[in-house]
Amino acid sequence: MSSTEFDLVVLGTGPSGGTVARQIAERGQRVAIVDAREFGGVCALRGCNPKKVYVNAGAVVDQVRRAQGSLLSQGEASIDWSQLHQFKRQFTQPVLDSSEDKYRDAGIATYHGAAEFLSPSRLRIEDAELQAKRVLIATGAKPVPLGIDGEQHILHSDDFLGLSELPERILFIGGGYVSMEFAHVVARCGRTVAVVQNDSRILTGFDADMVESLTRYSREQGIRFHLDASVTAVERQDGGGLRAVLSDGQSIATDMVIHGAGRVPNIDKLNLDAGEVEFGKQGVAVDQYLRSVSNPRVYATGDCADSDVPRLTPVANEEARAVVVNLAADEPHAVADYGVVPSVAFTTPSIASIGLSEAEARKQCDKLRVHADDMSSWGSVRKTGGTVAAYKILIDGNTDRILGAHLLGPAAEETINLFALAMKHDLTAADIKSTLFVFPTFASDVRQML
């Protein structure tokens, strides 16, 4: 086998691509991995992990401010953006420094550059041509093109996480989790924040009642919402700054515009037609084994696979597990076991969800029990200085099984995992209530919710 012939070529160095490359190489197969950007992927370098550093900083400042006058003496609590930016690099720089070397140490050939199919089994990466028995497409997603005037003035989430200085005024396009998480951080920095959302509410994937409470609290923190509106143009002002023109006729003066209005599979430059790889707007068309429906040599995972599941890192990791099994087998047989997938927006406080919405549960269950209440007076919340917290648990009255859980408040991003565990293993509400949790903790609150 020549130096350009491989058993597997992996496109993308994120969590799923990296996992598959390493585990297939461990089985003695010849593997190459390719990335058009720095090795490490979005989650480690430009997404989940660095984002959480910023979110945690905002949450710490928020909690200190709420504790002043009751738990702490009065004093300034503020974020030093420059220091925060440097602190974030402690998490991203080691990935940049070591990722490629780790692949090479594992015997994996590394290539930098944009990949494109030349045929169903051949790819080009810059000046190199690779022959592949199998290909994994794990190239992730990228911001959806907005197609508006002045789009060149708009930055993306990658750019936000790379800012060494924070301007005084920031406008976010879109009211999804990316915009809302960043908006809460910026608000804790004392900056002017606006969110433009082309819907009547933000965070449309979360429970409406939880979102209403979060929206109200967000406004109290200084975040301004422009709902049922979209940005139609962004203009550079002669005196400095930008002006965002909205579909409702308003215009907003700002220093920076951040695109948080959704992402699309990053596959448009792969020349998939030449690879005989069927695809659509939602990504590469795959079967139950995550194999291309049109080219059996090709698999796809994560954000670029057209699978009916949330596009989250844990999902990509589970898909990687299944693909490793299938690539190592004579015939594919492993399917990803998604179970139920929890979702979280790391706002302050966080909002979390798993399972069915209330509307979906009412359609599917003829004896639905809805346990819902405000938790702002609960001791676990008050001890943190929290003022906003709520829950809604949906239970099948016929089986006592949990159909859905929706949380807002301190540690919602942790507590939702207990519901994920219960739903994955088909535990009843009675099973959970009979479990002894450490008290007082947020986990022990779950018994009271049921």
Image: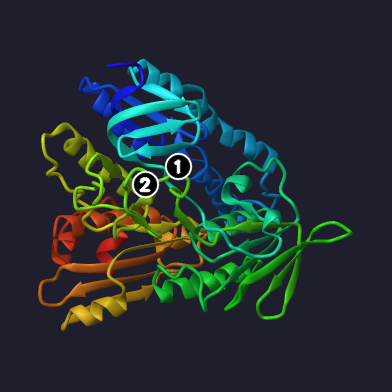
* Residue at left offset 51%, top offset 75%: 201
Residue 105 in the image, given as x and y percentages of width and height: 37, 16
Which callout, 1 or 2, points at the residue further toward the start of the chain? 1
Is 246 on the left-hand or right-hand side of 214?
A: right
Is 73 on the left-hand or right-hand side of 266?
A: right
Residue 111 in the image, given as x and y percentages of width and height: 45, 26
* Residue at left offset 19%, top offset 52%: 288
Residue 422 in the image, given as x and y percentages of width and height: 20, 57
Q: Secondary structure at mark 2?
A: helix
Q: Quadrant of residue 374?
A: bottom left
Q: Which mark is residue 43?
A: 1
Q: Secondary structure at mark 1?
A: helix
Query: Can you see residue 14?
Result: no
* Residue at left offset 35%, top offset 16%: 3
Q: Which mark is residue 313?
A: 2
Q: Which mark is residue 34?
A: none
* Residue at left offset 37%, top offset 42%: 138
Q: Are marks 1 and 2 in contact (CB under 8 Å)?
A: yes
